[in-house]
Amino acid sequence: MSKGGHEMMTIIGIDVGKAKLDCLWLKDPATGKVKTKVFANTPDGRLALMGWTEQQTPVALNAVHFMMGATGVYHEALAYTLYRAGAKVSVVDPAQGRDDAKGLGSRTRTDKKDSWVLARLGATQGTRLWQPEPDEVRKLAPPRPH
């Protein structure tokens, strides 16, 4: 359900690093208008990201599609946090992001550019939604940092 009556796809691309989350909301895919913000990749930073999203976007958190790159273990805590909050989450293979960046004419790589590429990927192609592993599988896996 939208806050202001708009029914539009709200996409936020996130370049996930060990220490920070470079976020880019693609406000208007047609004009390329964006809003960016950087958060710490910590529990408090993830909560701040969700608060910023709810303040900035015209929709509730469960109507937002977060696109992030698979970055070793660094994206996992964010993916779980957003999923548990009811948001749509896609985790993209980094090679797919690089290929899409080349297709969009982008040769340089920066965290902001990577988050833009991920948001554009969600807006133009969409991706499969991420699902957490079943608890039985997670219990068998070695512990991961959160």
Image (cartoon, grey):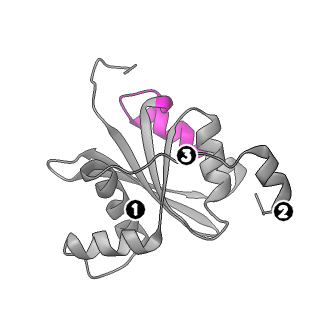
Q: Residue furthest bottom?
A: 107
- Marking on residue 115: 1
Query: With 69 as the anchor, is 12 left or right in this view?
Result: left
Of the image marks 2 and 3, the number of the one nearer the N terminus:
3
Pick the front one: 111 or 72: 72
Q: Which residue in the structure is indicated by mark 3?
A: 49
Of 3 and 143, nearer the camera is: 143
Q: Which of marks 2 and 1 is in front?
A: 2
Residues in magenta? 47-62
Position of residue 31 measured from the top left corner of the image (x, y, whole percent) = 14, 50
Mark 2 or 1, nearer chain start: 1
Identify the residue at image location x=65%, y=57%.
76
Report whether 91 appears left or right of 144.
Answer: left
- The CA distance from mark 2 to mark 3 is 25 Å
Residue displayed at 48% across by 45% down: 129
102 on left or right of 45: left
> Callout 3: helix, strand or loop?
helix
Q: Do we see residue 47 in this rendering?
A: no
Q: Give residue 136's position: percent from left, percent from top.
A: 81, 47
